[in-house]
Amino acid sequence: MSNTVNTEKLSSARFATATDAFVEVFTASVDFDQRMAAEDIQGSLAHAYMLNTIGILSDAELAAIQQGLAQIQTEIAEGRFNWSIKQEDVHMNIEARLTDLIGIAGKKLHTGRSRNDQVATDIRLYLRNEIVNITAQIDRLQRGLLDQAELHAATIMPGFTHLQVAQPVTFGHHLMAWFEMLSRDRERLQDCAKRLNVMPLGAAALAGTSYPIDRHLTAKLLGFSRPSANSLDSVSDRDFAIEFAAAASLIMLHLSRFSEELILWSSAQFDFIDIPDAFCTGSSIMPQKKNPDVPELVRGKSGRVTGHLVSLLMLMKSQPLAYNKDNQEDKEPLFDTADTLINCLRAFADMIPNIQPKQTQMYQSAKRGFATATDLADYLVRKGMAFRDAHEIVGLAVRLGIDTQRDLSELSLQELQQFSSSISADVFEVLSLEGSVAARKHIGGTAPDTVRAAINTARAALANLNSI
Ligand code: ARG
């Protein structure tokens, strides 16, 4: 951090003494809010253009501001900009540098606005971009899931409830469950983006401004759907940040669930998948280890994003209208939420297409847990038995299987018939894992053909979303 900007503190005239050195550091946000420099410049350009159209800035002043801001943009991009804590935040740093560069016109830029509406505008612009970037990563991940699901639409694995083998499903069907979660996540982000895309600029400090500003023009220039309706609300509202953090927390929660399954599945005990070496690391002491670091880290990071959501909720709780300095605390949790989310989605999008399911192990595991017991009960129901009675009878058959260490499909017809005379040779079709999954062919079921149809529908929907 360099202190070479020679402009004095912008708001110093009212103060008899200088700010305490520690307070200066304590209250400054430039270390982290300089990240919104591009958005701050974008907002200033729109504001200056509007001021020119209403006659507050001359054409020459507007041109000087545009040229000065372009130079500042370059200095920042090339790492040559001297960020100063004396100038407190990104807004005052840029304005001070602009005044250094172009003189009096720079001092006119802040006419009719305040840092309160400026910062609210910057964050919205910033989050709007981040939502685009995050959605692109969700997209990559969803496509990876669709490709894997397509390859494994008929790959059989045990489905679980209570983490106990329940009924056979296909690996493709399981992956499509993850896909569905991400589709909702994506919708939530788009919904958040809609409410976020309202422009606070023009609210000024809290009450609006006495200049005849054209807020429709600035909103249009910045791509906002409309100017905000109430100046007090505009500068104090951080609902959009909380909504974003909530949507992000839910995405991370989903990723933590995917992670947990990948971690379990890659263990020797499950042995369902191989996570490629590129996404794992070894142990410094145990030579045999291959740890699923990426899913473990993602699982861990989900806690941190939910933590940010709680921070933002608590930040806003009980705040009186309108702007309060508390709001400066919104940025670090927001930035970290966006970074963490993008990184985790990216890691998953890179990893998922490279996961190798171990089909034989999955199949054997589905066979071990009496996964077709419900199919036997359904078979008896089709033969005229009440479901509850069928449930009882199948329980007895399962007990025989446990006692003799065989799957239901490995019991003989005679053995099965001792439980019910309705059982005949066609029972073995339903007791097979293939028969079990194939039977579930209604919408949302796990039958391979149904899964393939779901994949096609999802692919078309995704392509459609992206063409809008
Ligand atoms: N750095 C401040 C923030 O992040 C900008 C707004 C400051 N406004 C003020 N009245 N002190 O919120």
Image (spheres, grey):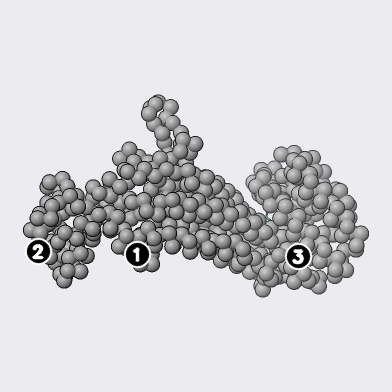
Q: Which disc number belongs to residue 441?
A: 1
Q: Is residue 62 above or below residue 404?
A: below
Nearer to us: label 2 or label 3:
2
According to the picture, the residue beneath numbered tag 2 turns out to be 421
Q: Can residue 381 be seen in the rendering of this structure?
A: yes
Crowd band around label 1 with a 10 angstrom C-alpha radius: few (<14), some (14–19), many (20+): some
The residue sitting at 54% across, 61% down in the picture is: 462
- For the residue pair 101 and 191, the one nearer the viewer reads as 191
- For the residue pair 210 and 191, the one nearer the viewer reads as 191
What is the spatial separation of the Cα atoms under label 2 and label 3, in whole angstroms? 78 Å
Tell me the kind of residue under disc 1.
Lys
Quadrant of the image for the N terminus? top right
> Where's residue 254, x and y in %?
44, 54
The residue sitting at 35% across, 67% down in the picture is: 442
Crowd band around label 3 with a 10 angstrom C-alpha radius: few (<14), some (14–19), many (20+): some
> Where's residue 257, x and y in %?
41, 51
Kind of element beneath mark 2: loop
Mark 2 vs 3: CB contact within 8 A? no
Tell me the kind of residue under disc 2.
Ser
Q: Is residue 29 above or below residue 240?
A: above
Q: Which disc number belongs to residue 143?
A: none
* Farthest-out residue, left: 418
Q: Is residue 286 above or below residue 144?
A: above
